[in-house]
Image: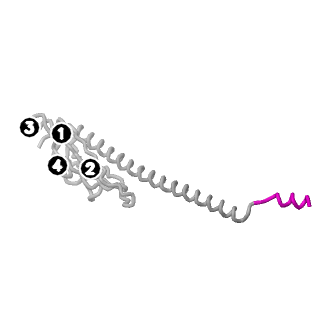
């Protein structure tokens, strides 16, 4: 009888307890997995936004350098800016309606693309304007340019990333 009592006091987990504990673990794992997925999506979107800002910053730096180093600014209005440096005509323009291109020409007719923005970025607007000048003859004029971009993947819904910069030049002429 004593053996029978000892045997009955040793209990294991019932099937119901095991199923309930598995269900609780499954719910916790599902919540953690969804949290990880959301975190990955947010990180990817932030990374894509960062790449667009980086690309716009690079374009701004290149345009600013060309404007500052130009011997003569021919025209910087609308979606194109043309300048001369060391006898070569340099043109920054919106090419194929979604990319910014840097083109060079020796004769002003045949242009060669030397730079084009990457495929993941769509440039919706590239606009050059004449800024303020020091005197009336426009010898020292600022060039203001604005770019509006978005990511090429519509699922990321990254749009209206704006970059505007003013560049001073001492060689503006019309």
Secondary structure predominantly adopted by residues drawn in magenta: helix
Residue denoted by label 4? 77
Please, which residue is most extreme toward the left here? 136
In the structure shown, which secondary structural element does the residue marked by tag 4 occupy? Answer: strand
Residue 66 sits inside the magenta stretch: no
Q: Secondary structure at mark 3?
A: loop
Task: Point out which mark residue 137 bears.
Answer: 3
Q: Which range is magenta?
A: 1-12
Q: Which quadrant would the N terminus be assigned to in this image?
A: bottom right
Residue at mark 4 to residue at mark 3: CA–CA distance: 17 Å
Instruction: Tell me the quarter of the picture where residue 99 sits.
Output: bottom left
For disc 1, the marked residue is: 142
Residue beneath disc 2 = 147
- Which circle's residue, 4 or 2, is located before the other in the chain? 4
- Observer-side mark, 4 or 2, equals 2
Q: Earlier in the sequence, mark 1 or mark 3?
A: 3
Q: Are marks 4 and 3 in contact (CB under 8 Å)?
A: no
Q: Secondary structure at mark 2?
A: strand
- Which is nearer the N-term, disc 2 or disc 1? 1
Q: CA distance from mark 2 to mark 1?
A: 17 Å
Residue visible at 19% across and 42% down? 143
Residue 9 on the magenta span = yes
Residue 100 locus on image (x, y percent): 28, 52
Q: CA distance from mark 4 to mark 2?
A: 13 Å
């Amino acid at each position: 009888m004593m053996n029978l009592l000892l045997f009955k006091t040793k209990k294991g987990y019932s099937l119901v307890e095991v199923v309930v504990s598995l269900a609780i673990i499954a719910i916790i794992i599902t919540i953690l997995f969804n949290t990880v997925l959301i975190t990955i999506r947010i990180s990817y979107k932030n990374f894509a936004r960062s790449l667009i800002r980086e690309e716009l910053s690079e374009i701004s730096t290149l345009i600013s350098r060309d404007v500052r180093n130009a011997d003569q600014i021919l025209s910087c209005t609308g979606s194109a800016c043309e300048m001369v440096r060391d006898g070569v005509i340099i043109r920054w323009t919106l090419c194929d309606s979604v990319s910014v291109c840097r083109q060079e020409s020796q004769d002003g007719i045949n242009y060669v693309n030397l730079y084009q923005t990457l495929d993941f970025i769509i440039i919706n607007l590239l606009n050059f304007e004449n800024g303020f000048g020091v005197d009336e003859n426009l010898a020292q004029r600022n060039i203001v340019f604005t770019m509006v971009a978005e990511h090429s993947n519509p699922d990321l819904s990254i749009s209206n990333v704006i970059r505007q910069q003013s560049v001073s030049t001492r060689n503006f002429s019309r």
